[in-house]
């Protein structure tokens, strides 16, 4: 059991990549707090996982919700070892100037500010206990941007650089910080990446840019997160692991 006796928070755990990560972690002995703003999705995942998981509703862009999430985790399971910052959002694929200020602010609040808040509330605990792990889910969009997703691309670039900087600063505290860059995958955001229409023709265009010939799946991302969160990766920090099927454009 690669995560035996570990306790993890997985944000955005009520669907998609987060659901896959939560399920994979519990298979390896981890107890998981599933966090999501979608109560129905979060509670469904927890029911499927049984006694190894609990649900805590929260908005990752809110300071008070992070404080409550960490308190809930410690009250429920007595410890915290791993934080997976998976929750994310996007704007629809469209010309950059068509995106509203409100949409821009929400993207950066969910995708970037959440990293700041997770650090604010989890680093002091990790320092006190002698170490911990962050796994931050970014995107290939942060290193090889697609047209029409400018502000989303920028937010994921910020996650990547912030994570690398955190890794350097927190290494003396035995706190590891790594990032995963998924290529477009089977999640609720896929239609938005495609401009609001998930059609076989548009999917084919996306898949044509991926040499291994398919979109990413939750299990692909979950297996990468499992490795980075485990003690097998104890000497790995500041890494940006691309789970992208070889995408080069």
Image (cartoon, rainbow, N blue to C red):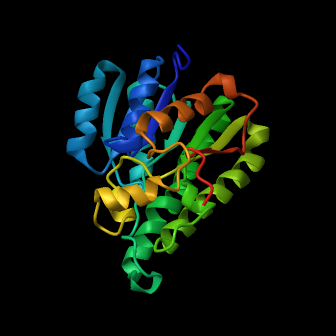
In the orientation shown, which residue stands out farthest toward the top?
A: 1
The answer to which image quadrant residue 140 occupies is bottom right
- Residue 184, percent across and down? 45, 53
Q: Position of residue 4 (x, y in %)?
A: 52, 15
Rendered view: 159 above or below 95? above
Q: Is residue 41 visible?
A: yes
The mark tally for this picture is 0
Q: Could you tell me which quadrant the C terminus lies in?
A: bottom right
**On the image, which quarter does residue 34 sit in?**
top left
Quarter of the image for residue 192 reads: bottom left
137 relative to 21, above or below = below
Residue 113: x and y in percent read 51, 62
Q: Between residue 171 and residue 16, name the one nearer to us.
A: 16
Q: Would you place residue 15 above or below residue 156 in this image?
A: above
Judge left or right: residue 211 versus residue 20. Answer: right
Residue 71 seen anywhere in this rendered image of the structure: no
Residue at the farthest left position: 40
Residue 97 or residue 36, whichever sits in front: 97
- Tell me residue 215's x, y (percent): 44, 46
Q: Residue at x 34, y 69 (%)?
A: 195
Image point 42% across, 40% down: which residue? 217
Q: Residue at x 45, y 44 (%)?
A: 214
The reply, left or right, for residue 67 in relation to residue 41 is: right
Front residue of 203 and 176: 203
User: Looking at the image, is 7 positioned above or below residue 83?
Assistant: above
């Amino acid at each position: 059991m690669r995560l035996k006796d570990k306790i993890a928070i997985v944000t955005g755990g009520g669907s998609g990549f987060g659901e896959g990560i939560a399920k994979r972690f519990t298979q390896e002995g981890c107890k998981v707090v599933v966090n999501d703003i979608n109560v129905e999705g979060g509670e469904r995942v927890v029911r499927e996982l049984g006694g190894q998981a609990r649900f805590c509703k929260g908005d990752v862009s809110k300071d008070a919700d992070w404080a409550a999430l960490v308190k809930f985790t410690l009250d429920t399971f007595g410890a915290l070892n791993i934080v997976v910052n998976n929750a994310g959002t996007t704007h629809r694929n469209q010309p950059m100037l068509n995106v509203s200020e409100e949409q821009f602010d929400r993207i950066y609040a969910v995708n970037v500010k959440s990293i700041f808040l997770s650090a604010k509330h989890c680093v002091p605990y990790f320092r006190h206990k002698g170490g911990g792990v962050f796994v931050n889910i970014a995107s290939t969009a942060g290193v090889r941007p697609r047209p029409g997703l400018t502000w989303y691309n920028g937010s994921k670039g910020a996650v990547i650089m912030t994570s690398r900087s955190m890794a350097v600063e927190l290494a003396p505290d035995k706190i590891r910080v790594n990032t995963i860059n998924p290529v477009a995958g089977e999640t609720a955001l896929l239609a938005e990446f495609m401009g609001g229409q998930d059609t076989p023709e548009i999917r084919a265009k996306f898949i044509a840019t991926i040499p291994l010939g398919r979109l990413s799946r939750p299990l692909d991302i979950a297996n990468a997160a499992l490795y980075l969160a485990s003690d097998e990766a104890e000497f790995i920090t500041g890494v940006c692991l691309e789970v992208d099927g070889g995408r080069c454009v």
